[in-house]
Image: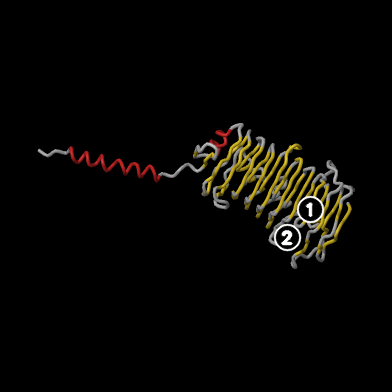
Amino acid sequence: MKRFTPVLVLATALGAPVAAQAQAQAPQAPYMIAETGQRFAGLQAAVAAIGDRRGTIMIAPGLYRDCAVQTQGDVAFLATVAGQVTFDGAICEGKAALVVRGRSARVEGIIFQNQRVGEGNGAGIRLEHGNLIVRQAWFRDSEEGILSADDPAGSVLIERSTFAGLGRCDRGLSCAHGIYIGDYGSVTVRNTRFEAGRGGHYLKSRAARIEVTDCSFDDSAGRASNYMIDLSIGATGLIRGNWFVGGPDKENRTTFISNAPEGHAHNADGLTIDGNVARLVPSAKYTTAFFVDWSGDAVKLGQNVIGAGIRRFEKR
């Protein structure tokens, strides 16, 4: 009579390291809270774990059809490898990939693409309250890059980022823009590129104070675009060291930079615009103005390099 016990023992002995090896090779959950080492399969679960505290969510490289809503706390969303984390298409609350309304949010190294909603203003980030910092991020091929509500006590800082293929002004809906910041305390945009707009403005702000420095606004491949910078209800601050290139296909060709075209809620005294370069591409068969002011405030329009076909200033 055959005895099978040795075979069973052998199988058990071999099975243990195989199981351990399989467990070791299993992929880890992609969202990790840096302060605690906790890992989560979904972004919303990681945000919930931070709650009303301060925390950093490290995101592994990958393409994610995921989104999250931050309602409290101070949360940082960081790619472990900049440019290798992409949020593609997923929308929370019918608004954006990230909906943030806590005390503060920070976003670094992440790509946002293909955000669209029925209302025509799908965004990579919807800011509803608190401070926001965005660094080395990419927003592309969506209706809006960043869209905010009003928070006069809040601030927005955007650095070293790219906004491409954004905006729309069709279907009888309110226009969408590359960046649209509501009535915030301040907006600062540095070393950032805007290109290939698809309608609306490249940068629209209703904030009381604006700083746009060392950026490029390349409208050469734009389609049905509008202003480069729109300070909708007036603003003070600084616009310096930027390059502006007007393209041939614009819905509104009247100006590059506007101040207070929708009202005069904020005083623009001291708004300084200097050290910029503005050109039209050769195929742009129209004339325009570099800066148009509706406020009548004491704006300081300094030395700027203005190309052919562009009037330096207009008062309206």
Q: Position of residue 36 (x, y in %)?
A: 52, 36
Apparent side of residue 49 relative to residue 268 in the rendered image (left or right): left
Q: Residue furthest left?
A: 1
Q: Indicate left or right for 310 with 74 as reference.
A: right
Residue 192, position as x, y percentages in the image: 69, 54
User: How many neighbours does mark 1 have within 10 angstroms: few (below 14), some (14-19), or many (20 or more)?
Assistant: many
Q: Amino acid at mark 1?
A: Ile
Q: Identify the residue shown where x is 19% and y is 41%.
A: 7
Q: Position of residue 141 (x, y in %)?
A: 62, 52
Kind of residue at disc 2: Asp
| Location of mark 1 (residue) | 239
Does label 1 or label 2 sit earlier along the sequence? 1
In front here: 105 or 165? 105
When asked about the image quadrant of residue 66, the answer is: top right
**Which quarter shows the N terminus?**
top left
Kind of element beneath mark 1: strand
Image position of 49 (left or right of 225): left
What is the spatial separation of the Cα atoms under label 1 and label 2, in whole angstroms?
24 Å
The residue sitting at 80% across, 65% down in the picture is: 307
Q: Residue at x 61, y 47 (%)?
A: 108
Count up the numbered dots. Answer: 2
Could you say which quadrant of the image residue 242 lies in? bottom right
Tell me if residue 310 comes above or below residue 87 in the rendering. Answer: below
Name the image quarter holding residue 148: top right
Rendered image: mark on residue 261:
none
Question: What number is the disc on residue 249?
Answer: 2
Residue at the extreme front of the image, as rendered? 35
Residue lying furthest bottom in this view? 282
